[in-house]
Amino acid sequence: MDFSLFIIPAIVLSLGFALMFYMMNKNKKHVTSQDLATERLSSAVYQKEYLDSEYNYIKDWMRNAPIDAFTSATIPYTGMDKAKDVGKDLLKSALTLGTVKFRTVETPSFVVLSEGKMHYFSTTVEGDLKEHLIFNADRLSNAIVTSEVEKNNSEGATSKSTEILAKKYIFTFNIDGQSTAIEVHDRIAFNSDVTSMFGNNYSLMLTKNQVVGETFYNKIIEIYPNLIVKK
């Protein structure tokens, strides 16, 4: 038996576990060291930095209209939806006799608050603008919002660690008798390559993503109190 066949998988698996524990430890340090109250005072500065650098394309999409706040978003994607996509991908692959493998991927989406309107942008795999939807005051005044906390979470968690658990605000609209939902995230999705996770600025990046992203919900409920999640 050629044991070399098992060596490479074993090494890859070991490296995977090592990376997992490394990131768990790094994230734990991030939770205990960050001062969100102080960092929130710089949310406007951080937002401007983002819009002038890695998210400058959002200004192009907005055609220089004012951006009061922005964050990541998604269209709710259920297990049934994923199963349907897998089935369609397998069918498309089969039609090519296996010469082409198809795989549906979720692409970045964003919401922007501008002059009382909510703009939803979805992107292509290449990062180009795919869809632009605008929800005006009438739509937002009649919307309903519920929240969802990620469930990797919180029994026995400290108040500080609970504060940084990722949340999604599900905005539900009734449009022509059809229920339409958009998940608004309370932070910007991690926006750098994997190597950034090993850098000294990793913790600050996570903090900036959170304080910039959470500003969206805080600002929109000031305009539309009906969007406050009922407890």
Image (cartoon, grey):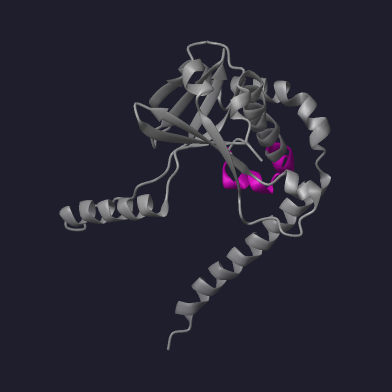
Which segment did they paint magenta? 191-205
In the image, taking residue 22 as reference, residue 29 lies left or right, namely right
202 lies left or right of 55:
right
The image quarter in which residue 224 lies: top right
Task: Using the image, determine if residue 79 lies above or below residue 131.
Answer: below
Instruction: Give the prevailing secondary structure in the magenta stretch.
Output: helix
Quick check: 131 left or right of 159? left
- Residue in the foreground of this view, choosing between 84 and 180: 180
User: In terms of depth relative to the viewer, which is nearer, 51 or 182?
Assistant: 182
Determine if residue 66 is in view.
Answer: yes
Q: Quadrant of the N terminus?
A: bottom left
Give above or below for 59 relative to 34.
above
Q: At x 67% / y 55%, what residue is drawn? A: 153
User: Is residue 128 visible in the rendered structure shown here?
Assistant: no
Say above or below: 99 vs 111: below
Q: Residue at x 45, y 36 (%)?
A: 181
- Residue 201: where, in percent of width, then height? 72, 39
Residue shown at the point (61%, 46%) measured from the top left: 195
Quarter of the image where the C terminus is located: top right
x and y, in percent, of residue 74 in the image? 48, 38
Q: State whether residue 201 is above or below residue 113.
A: below
